[in-house]
């Protein structure tokens, strides 16, 4: 699966790498869910980081993890104050 995303990472980032294409119902659903959270949040499979940034902008201590290095490179560049790591979900220190 990671190989498929890696091969198409540039296309994915172009199409989905911001909050602009997010449907308002999805944004509301995630925002409402996030408002009930406490403690650190791991955005597992964070892609290019837009949702991780959204969580941080809502006041959460969030970090992103993804298998695709190109996504993490883009996330770190776009959102420099947020922690993003290349990694497997099974290897998380949480």
Image: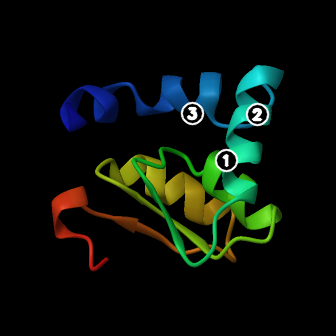
Query: What is the crowding at mark 3: few (fewer than 14 residues within 10 Å), some, or many (at least 20)?
Result: some
Residue 88 in view, yes or no: no
First in sequence, mark 2 or 3: give its number. Answer: 3
Instruction: Tell whether label 3 touches label 1 (CB within 8 Å).
Output: no
- Give residue 47's position: percent from left, percent from top: 48, 44
Label annotation for residue 27: 2
- Quarter of the picture holding the C terminus: bottom left
Cα separation between marks 1 and 2? 10 Å
Which quadrant would residue 88 be assigned to in this image?
Answer: bottom left
Task: Tell which circle, 1 or 2, labels the residue nearer the N-terminal end.
Answer: 2
In this rendering, would 44 be left or right of 22?
A: left
Q: Quadrant of residue 5?
A: top left
Q: What secondary structure is found at the residue carrying circle 1?
A: helix
Q: Residue furthest front?
A: 36
**Res. 13 mark:** 3
Position of 26 with respect to 13 (left or right) is: right
Q: Is residue 78 above or below residue 26?
A: below
- Residue at the image point whose x is 26% and y is 71% from the top: 92
> In the drawing, what numbered circle is on residue 33?
1
Whether tag 1 and tag 2 are in contact, CB under 8 A, the answer is: no
Tell me the residue at 70%/71% (across/down): 60
Please give the name of the residue rendered at 42% of the width and 33% of the height, measured from the top-left corner: 9
Q: Residues within 10 Å of mark 1 (few under 14, many from 20)?
A: few
Real-space CA distance between mark 2 and mark 3, rounded to the nearest whole angstrom: 18 Å
């Amino acid at each position: 699966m990671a190989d498929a995303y890696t091969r198409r990472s540039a296309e994915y980032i172009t199409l989905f790498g911001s909050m602009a294409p997010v449907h308002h119902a999805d944004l509301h659903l995630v925002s409402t869910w996030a408002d009930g959270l406490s403690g650190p949040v791991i955005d597992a499979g964070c892609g290019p980081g837009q949702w991780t940034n959204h969580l941080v902008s809502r006041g959460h201590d969030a970090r992103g993890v993804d298998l695709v290095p190109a996504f993490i490179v883009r996330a770190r560049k776009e959102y420099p104050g947020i922690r993003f790591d290349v990694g497997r979900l099974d290897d998380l220190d949480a």
